Image: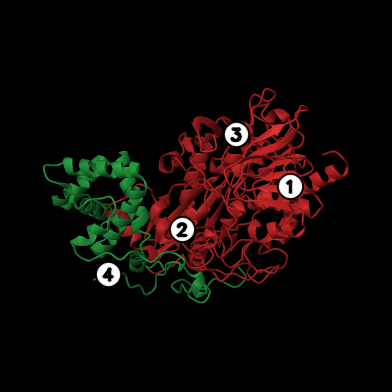
């Protein structure tokens, strides 16, 4: 059972590998190279707390953490910093980060802002979440175009809520 | 392609193959000069490029470590990558967005026109606009710049419609789609744009000028260019007379080589060019080559570049089409009544979702951020590039840390001048006002991203004590050593610098070839 995204308007360059297919259930963590289940689920919730798009399914955040895991697997020094982040997030309150309400999770993350661990998690989250083709589809970014003939006949000048620009400008 | 021996001392060695180095290589070889180009990056083709923001960034960018310091925001947001340029055959011309504007007379006489501004090191250019204009014309013809040589301008896209009506509602007068080295119609054997929107990740269709698809193939066709990709220049050597005699580089197999030379040209962009000069210190030149007056690496400029991203009620789809197709010239002139020296141009900016999210406000997260980025389809981008003030201590230096080639990692230090801050504030107000006048619901003042208009760090000066190179880009100290990139600018001006880099390279090639013919080089 897989949940590869079906996109209508958004296109990744065909030269790039397709989005990873993760299992739908909790066994998705078995695809990871470095993070254990507890770290992975904590990071999924951290990324969702940083970028809380209520309309996006969990699989998008899981793919983001999957990409972060690949980064950590390639660079063990980074893996150590991600582990520090999870330790810090879990140790900030009397409950583990994943058991906190959104308000408390936000407070924990605000308390960590400025740390190297927070910076790495936040920058990595932006890097991979908004590079996900299902997120592109959700927010109207159409992506790669040369293989479709560009946008010259696909709406590069179709804005119609302002008057046309006079000829010769 | 030509192959020259390592001990052939009849060749001109050019370090870097971008807008300066690649153009110079073509202009020299077509005049009969034998040239070796050392390029640190790979020789990619249009087929290698991807329509993907991060994929293109990682494929083309110079990602070797640098450090940064100073009050500029870049040192906080992009501490280890403060400068954005390319490592690939064709250099940053493979990445650029093709805006082609000329310096204006005020800018080339900056010290005389702006006056004595405390804390700055302004000088006038040692050449006049009149002297440069014929070379601008040659550059525009070579590059196929729209709005010149009978070439029509690029058509208005969605993002431009927003800029245009905002500007018109404010009463601004000089609004156009601008001038670009992107074909609006087929030109010079290259096709018209298909408005793909990915010019900065490498141009897959060839509608935009670059040295990769125009200058270097023509230089190779002369049979006088030996193009060596993945060859990383380390230092320049000199002979007993103090003349540049060879370039030491690491070849694609990691082996150190030494190419002899009759003349050497640095065209490695504003960080690598001073870095190589500083790394070439000897007993005779203890502060580095061409650095007798201590100016190498100093007066570093990066333009006052910033974007306002705005959310509208209805779709814009700014990602569709050529990305910087818009220009407003109303703020370009020096006008002291505004409270700052120098001017700026308003241009367009568009980015895809990945880099809009990353660069709109690095570090911003939470429900407010997502409420903006979820409106991506309704967002428009508007941009400015303005003149920043040269300061002696804004500079490229060598640190104690060595890279994999044993060369010290460069640090870029930049403190904002009070004039810079005043212009930035004025610019943000202008950009926001334009978008508000077109109906924007919310405007976000985005900070500068890693510097792409890198200038001034080996500057041109009339007097040797004021700079590094003379009016032909030849170093004051070493008569067969030249600079052919933006580091040779005497001051920054406001506009996108590539057209000026190309015009100066054409002029420099003419000078060098004439000197060689006369036995003087």
The dot on residue A3 is: 4
Q: Chain of mark 4?
A: A
Which of labels 1 and 3 is toward the front?
3
User: Are marks 2 and 1 in one subunit?
Assistant: yes
Tag 3 near tag 4, CB within 8 Å: no
The subunit carrying tag 1 is B
In the picture, the disc for residue A164 is none
- Horizontally, is B70 left or right of B357 in the view? right
Q: Tell me, yes or no, whether dots 1 and 4 are on the same chain.
A: no
Q: Secondary structure at mark 4?
A: loop
Tell me the residue that label 2 is attached to: B55
| Label 3 sits on residue | B297
Q: What is the C-alpha distance between the residues marked 3 and 4? A: 53 Å
Hue of chain B? red
Q: Please tell me how crowded label 2 is: few (under 14), some (14-19), or many (20+) other residues with Cα within 10 Å.
A: some
- Residue pictured at 68% horizontal, 48% vertical: B37
* Same chain for the residues under marks 1 and 3 in the image: yes
- Rendering coords of residue B6 (x, y %): 72, 42
How far apart marks 1 and 4 lie (CA) works out to 61 Å
> Percent position (x, y) of residue B512?
79, 44
Task: Check the image and name the residue furthest to the right.
Answer: B518
Residue B238, percent from left and from top: 72, 31
Of the pair B466 and B228, the residue shown nearer to us: B228
Q: Position of residue B206 (x, y in %)?
A: 61, 66
Whether tag 2 and tag 4 are in contact, CB under 8 A, the answer is: no
Do marks 3 and 4 share a subunit?
Answer: no
Provide the residue designation for mark 1: B129
The colour scheme applied to this rendered structure is by chain
Q: How many marks?
A: 4
Q: For the residues carrying marks 2 and 1, which lies nearer the camera in this image? A: 2
């Amino acid at each position: 059972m897989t949940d590869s995204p079906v996109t209508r308007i958004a296109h990744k360059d065909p030269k790039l590998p397709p989005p990873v297919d993760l299992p739908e259930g909790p066994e998705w963590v078995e695809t990871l190279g470095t993070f254990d289940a507890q770290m992975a689920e904590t990071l999924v919730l951290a990324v969702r707390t940083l970028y809380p798009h209520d309309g996006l399914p969990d699989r998008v955040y899981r793919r983001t953490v999957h990409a972060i895991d690949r980064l950590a697997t390639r660079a063990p020094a980074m893996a150590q910093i991600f582990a520090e982040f999870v330790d810090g997030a879990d140790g900030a309150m009397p409950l583990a980060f994943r058991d906190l309400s959104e308000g408390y999770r936000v407070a924990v993350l605000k308390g960590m802002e400025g740390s190297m661990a927070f910076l790495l998690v936040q920058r990595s989250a932006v890097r991979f979440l908004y590079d996900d083709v299902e997120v592109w589809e959700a927010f109207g970014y159409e992506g790669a175009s040369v293989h479709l003939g560009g946008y010259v006949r696909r709406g590069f000048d179709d804005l119609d809520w302002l008057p046309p620009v006079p000829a010769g400008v | 392609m030509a192959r020259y021996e390592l001990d052939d001392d009849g060749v001109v060695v050019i370090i870097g193959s971008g807008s300066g180095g690649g153009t110079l290589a073509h202009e020299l070889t077509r005049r009969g000069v034998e040239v070796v180009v050392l390029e640190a990056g790979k020789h990619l083709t249009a087929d290698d490029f991807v329509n993907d923001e991060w994929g293109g960034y990682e494929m083309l960018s110079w990602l070797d470590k640098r450090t940064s310091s100073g009050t500029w925001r870049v040192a906080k947001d992009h501490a280890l990558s403060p400068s954005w340029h390319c490592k690939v055959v064709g250099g940053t011309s493979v990445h650029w967005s093709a805006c082609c504007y000329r310096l204006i007379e005020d800018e080339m006489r900056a010290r005389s026109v702006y006056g004595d501004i405390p804390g700055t090191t302004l000088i006038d250019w040692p050449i006049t606009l009149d002297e440069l204009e014929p070379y601008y014309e040659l550059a525009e013809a070579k590059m196929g710049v729209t709005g010149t040589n009978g070439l029509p301008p690029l058509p208005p896209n969605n993002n431009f419609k927003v800029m245009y009506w905002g500007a018109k509602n404010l009463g601004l007068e000089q609004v156009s789609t601008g001038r670009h080295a992107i074909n609006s119609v087929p030109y010079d054997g290259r096709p018209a744009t298909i408005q793909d929107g990915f010019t900065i990740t490498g141009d897959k269709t060839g509608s935009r000028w670059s040295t990769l698809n125009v200058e270097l193939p023509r230089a190779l066709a002369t049979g006088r260019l030996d193009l060596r990709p993945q060859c990383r220049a380390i230092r320049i050597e000199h002979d007993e007379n103090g003349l540049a005699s060879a370039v030491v580089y690491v070849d694609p197999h990691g082996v150190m080589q030494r190419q002899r030379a009759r003349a050497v040209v640095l065209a490695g962009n504003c960080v690598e060019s001073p870095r190589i000069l500083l790394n070439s210190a000897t007993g005779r030149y203890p502060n580095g080559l061409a650095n007798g007056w201590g100016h190498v690496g100093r007066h570093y400029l990066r333009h006052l570049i910033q974007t306002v991203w705005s959310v509208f009620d209805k779709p814009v789809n700014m990602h569709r089409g050529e990305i910087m197709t818009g220009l407003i010239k109303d703020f370009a002139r020096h006008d002291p009544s505004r409270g700052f020296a120098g001017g700026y141009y308003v241009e367009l900016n568009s980015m895809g979702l990945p880099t809009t999210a990353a660069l709109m406000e690095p570090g911003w997260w939470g429900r407010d951020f997502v409420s903006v980025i979820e409106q991506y389809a309704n967002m428009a981008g508007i941009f400015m590039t303005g003149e920043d003030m040269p300061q002696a201590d804004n500079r490229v230096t060598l640190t104690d840390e060595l890279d994999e080639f044993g060369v010290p990692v460069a640090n870029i230090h930049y403190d904002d001048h009070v004039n810079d801050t005043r212009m930035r504030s004025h610019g943000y107000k202008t950009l926001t006002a334009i978008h508000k006048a077109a109906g924007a619901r919310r405007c976000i003042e985005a900070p500068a991203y890693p510097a792409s208009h890198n200038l001034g760090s080996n500057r041109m000066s009339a007097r040797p004590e004021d700079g590094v190179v003379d009016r032909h880009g030849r170093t004051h100290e070493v008569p067969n050593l030249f600079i052919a990139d933006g580091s040779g600018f005497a001051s920054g001006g406001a506009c996108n610098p590539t057209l000026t880099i190309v015009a100066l390279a054409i002029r420099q090639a003419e000078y060098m070839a004439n000197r060689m013919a006369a036995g003087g080089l």
